[in-house]
Image (tube, coloured by chain):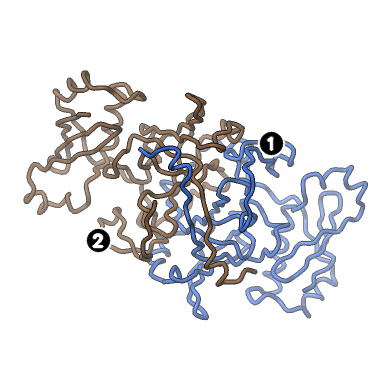
Chain colours: A blue, B brown
Amino acid sequence: MSNQSAANQLSIECHPIGEMITPFTQKFGIPRQSSGLTAIPGYIKMFPPYDDINGFRGIDDFSHLWIMFQFNQSIGTTHTYSPLVRPPRLGGNEKIGVFASRSSFRPNNIGLSKVKYSHIERVDGETRLHILGVDCLSGTPILDIKPYVTYADNEPDAQSGFADNAPVPTLIVIFAEDVLTQLDTCNLPETHTKSSLLALIEQVIAFDPRPAYHQKPDYQAQNPNKTYHIRLFYLDIEFIIENNKQAHIINIQA
Amino acid sequence: MSNQSAANQLSIECHPIGEMITPFTQKFGIPRQSSGLTAIPGYIKMFPPYDDINGFRGIDDFSHLWIMFQFNQSIGTTHTYSPLVRPPRLGGNEKIGVFASRSSFRPNNIGLSKVKYSHIERVDGETRLHILGVDCLSGTPILDIKPYVTYADNEPDAQSGFADNAPVPTLIVIFAEDVLTQLDTCNLPETHTKSSLLALIEQVIAFDPRPAYHQKPDYQAQNPNKTYHIRLFYLDIEFIIENNKQAHIINIQA
């Protein structure tokens, strides 16, 4: 048995094994627990020595993976422990315990996401693990990659309180005519065609990235025609929202 | 986007938020990925400031939790990265990539277990999170506790290769008469009655903790009547195995 005070004072040094490369270059707009969003592609660029392809032998047998990562806000900062958080799912008003939430403001700032495994490749001297359904900022440090083991990880009868149902898309996304024209002259991210980029933008915005209080009539009355911006790759996407129902994409530029 | 070399060199300091208290005071015999083994109780003793009960507000809404922990062998040691491991599930002969396995020999040595939530209590000035289905050595440092969120974590259609099926108990466990008598005079662990202790021993040994090569006829011919020992709490449990079918518990002593 370990000695409490000794174990308590112990600090554990971790090293990133790679970094996540995703369309999300800015925090606003990242879908939460987005494992269903398979239009959102990304890859993990492995750092040496973890880029050894042997480390992935047998991974094609698995359909899903767990990614453990370091939440962005912790890098290089120290912060005081707050036992209570306000989950966005509860409208940002109700406080619950950090250990009853998946909040990013937590001890050790370790995040856990289930993703769909796509493929692994060696390209330009790099090992890239391609995945689908990512919900991390690009550049997020990766701490571990584990296979999803159905018998151990699947718990169909689990109860999960306020988070029992998946978030659903609530906005219809409409692209203005001249935005579609704009995209023809704009340099697209190398991983995307025009149509896959439109699908990505649609999937991200349909989940309504606004804070809960922006969805209230009072706020909207005071801020008519408010414009929002989401950054995907190097593109700035500008939109307005009508009646909490339609998102109109009015501008896309590099 | 982050700079590769900077991110690569970055080290992240983690602190244990608590330690796992389990019946397992020795590595041999710990069931692997034992989330089904609800006879195996344990608790997390939280360290200050994470023992603040507010950190658990709302946790009763969840039936299952994820426990992130530090695998024991990493504490205070540095080791060279080995991209290949030999999972016990494959008989210990076949090598697969560490990222295609849940092996404990992995970068950052972070483990992930799904457990059943039981209850939380304040006792003797400690906050204890009681759980069922633990598969860690007692004293294991805990890095995080997260609720199991069904829509995000459950993946009923996942494929998991060689680990698609749960390990099943393969041994019938028989207690010698005088062992049952021994237990009447022996100090039992405070958390157990005689019958719950017998159930625990049975559940642990039924999964056959022996290395795969001990199960082969050759090994058994050369090592007839070999005795095995498992340590649970402060008790030494001695047993022999007949025909790969029956485990006879022949001695239990403190």
Label 2, on which residue? B93
Q: Which of the chains bears the disc numbered 1? A: A
Task: Provide the residue designation for mark 1.
Answer: A95
**Residue B87 in the image: x percent, y percent?**
31, 56
Residue type at mark 1 is: Lys
- Please tell me whether mark 2 or mark 1 is closer to you in this view: 1
* Classed neighbour count for the residue bearing mark 1: other residues with Cα under 10 Å, few (<14), some (14–19), many (≥20): some
Is A119 situated above or below B30?
Answer: below
Check disc 2 and report its element: helix, strand or loop. Answer: loop
Residue B201 location, x and y as percent?
27, 32
Identify the residue at horizontal 77%, vertical 45% (top origin): A212
Q: Nearer the viewer, residue B37 or A192?
A: B37
Q: Residue at x 38, y 69 (%)?
A: A54
Q: Residue at x 40, y 33 (%)?
A: B42
Chain to which the residue tagged by mark 2 belongs: B
Q: CA distance from mark 2 to mark 1?
A: 50 Å
